[in-house]
Image: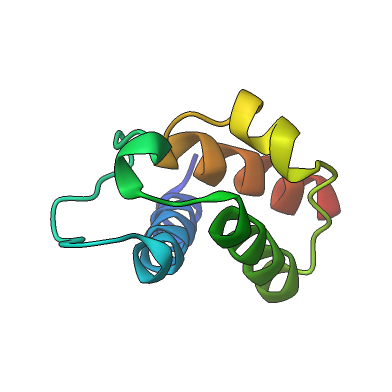
Amino acid sequence: MDVSDQQQRDALGESILAKIKTHAEGDTSGITLATPLNDLGIHSLELTEIIFDLEEEYGIEIDMNTADAWENLSTVSDIVAAVRALVASKS
């Protein structure tokens, strides 16, 4: 992976992390990629809004309903990885 690819990946991760923080409850300063989604106080409606925001911003389609999302995604990093894979598959 070259430097520009690494910077793009870091920018993508930071952008997604920022979106998640807008939906989390309480103090968001300690939220990292390793933070479990259950610790964020994000409920199914907020998760749906996050998914919609990500689809719109990155021109991707996240093919899962909210129940599946909760079963398959456990940390912030899982969301970032899923979006990265979808973005990469577009190019």
Quadrant where the C terminus is found in the figure = bottom right
Residue projecting furthest to the top: 71
Indicate the position of residue 4 as horizontal and vertical percent values. 46, 59
Q: Position of residue 69 (x, y in %)?
A: 67, 37
Tell how many labels.
0
User: At 72% from the left edge and 47% from the top edge, which residue is drawn?
Assistant: 88
In the rendered view, would you say 21 is above or below 63?
below
Q: Quadrant of residue 13?
A: bottom left
Q: Position of residue 79 (x, y in %)?
A: 54, 43
The residue positioned 75% from the left and 47% from the top of the image is: 86
Residue 91 shows in the view: no
* Pick the front one: 45 or 68: 45
Going by the image, does 80 lie left or right of 84? left
x%, y% of residue 80?
Answer: 52, 45
Which residue does the image show at 14% across and 51% down from the upper left? 30
In front here: 69 or 1? 69
Residue closest to the eye, 65 or 54: 65
User: Is residue 17 toward the left or the right of residue 60 in the image?
Assistant: left
Q: How are the residues colored?
A: rainbow
Q: Quadrant of residue 25?
A: bottom left
Q: Nearer the viewer, residue 51 or 17?
A: 51
Q: Is residue 90 visible?
A: yes
- Residue drawn at x 41%, y 39% is 37
